[in-house]
Image: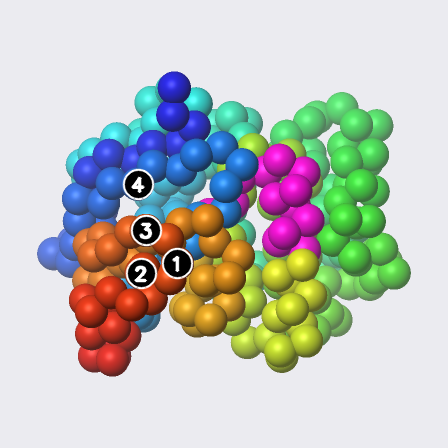
Amino acid sequence: MNFFQVENLTKKFGGLTANSDVSVNVEKGRIVGIIGPNGAGKSTFFGTVSGFYKPDGGRILFEGKDISGRPPEDTCRLGIARTFQIVRPLSSLSVLDNILVGAFLRDKNKKKAVARAEEVLELSGLKELRRQPAASLTIADKKRLELARALATRPKLLLLDEVMAGLTPKETQDAVELIKSINKRGITLFVVEHVMEVIMPISDKVIVLDGGRKIAEGLPEAVANDPEVIKAYLGE
Ligand code: ADP
Ligand code: MG
C-alpha cells in the first residue's frame, strides 16, 4: 500500500487550470520538496489534497483510502495537516491557545489536548513565548506558530507551504533544523518552497510544478540540473 498517492489531480478556478493532471507518490517517512515559480500551482495542490478545495479530476489516496473531495476536518482526523502560505494566527489569542486550537481539532479530551500543546510548545521552541498574543510575534515566530498549530493535530503527513519565506538566513537555518527534527519523529513532510537552495539539501525527492503541470521529479541534484526546470525559473 502506498502511503500517499495523488493520481492525475486537476483543479480549476473558473477558466484557469491551477493544477493539471498532477501525479505524485510520497513514501512514508520522507521529506518531499515541491518547487516552482510563482503561480505554478503549489499552494493550490496543498489546498486540494488537504480538502480545502474540491478536485475537478483525479484521485487522492492516503494510506490506501480514497480521500478525494473530503473536507479538511476529515483529512485532519486521518492525519494530514497543512500550514498556510499567508499565516493566519488567531491574533488576539496567546501562542499557547493558538496551539490548543490545533490540538482540540484532533482530540476533544482536554487533558490530552493540553498535554499535546505542551509537547508542541517544547518541540517548536515557542515555550518562552507561550503567553504572548500571537499578533505580537515576529514573522519568523508567526511562521513557527503556524507550524506548531499544524503539528498539534498529530499529523502523519505535514504539508508546509513556504514556512521559510521572508526569514533571515539564521531564522531559515533554525526552521530547517525544526523540519528535520519533526521528520525524525516519523512525520512525513511535503514542503513547498520558492527558493531552491533551501529545499534541495533536505529533500529526499523534489517535484517541480510549472503552469499547473508537473514538469520534473527526482533526486534534488538531477532536478536542479534539468534543462526544463532551469528554463522555468529563468523565465520568471
Ligand atoms: P503558487 O503557490 O505555486 O504560487 P497558486 O497555487 O497560489 O500558485 O496559484 C496557481 C494559480 O491559481 C495562479 O494563477 C493563481 O492566481 C490561481 N489561484 C490560486 N488560488 C486561487 C483562488 N482561490 N481563486 C482563483 N484563482 C486562484
Ligand atoms: Mg503559493
Q: Position of residue 219 (x, y in %)?
A: 37, 53
Mark 3 Cα-neighbour bin, 10 Å: few <14, some 14–19, many ≥20: some
Q: Earlier in the sequence, mark 4 or mark 3?
A: 4
Q: How far apart are the alpha carbons under marks 1 and 3?
A: 6 Å
Quick check: is the Cβ at mark 3 less than 8 Å away from ligand 1? no
Residue 223, disc: 2
| Proximity of marks 2 and 3: CB atoms separated by less than 8 Å | yes
Q: Earlier in the sequence, mark 2 or mark 3?
A: 3
Task: Find out whether the residues at labels 1 and 2 contact each other: C-beta distance under 8 Å.
Answer: yes
Task: Name the spot of residue 90 as percent of width and height, x first.
Answer: 65, 56
Query: Mark 1: few, some, or many residues within 10 Å (few <14, many ≥20)?
Result: many
The residue identified by callout 1 is 220
Q: Measuring 48% from the left and 53% from the top, which residue is drawn there? A: 203
Which stretch is magenta? 178-190
Q: CA distance from mark 1 to mark 2?
A: 5 Å
> Which element type, helix, strand or loop, lies under badge 4?
strand
Which label belongs to residue 24?
4
- Where does label 3 land, which residue? 218
Judged left or right of residue 218, residue 128 is right
Pick the quarter of the image with the N terminus.
top left
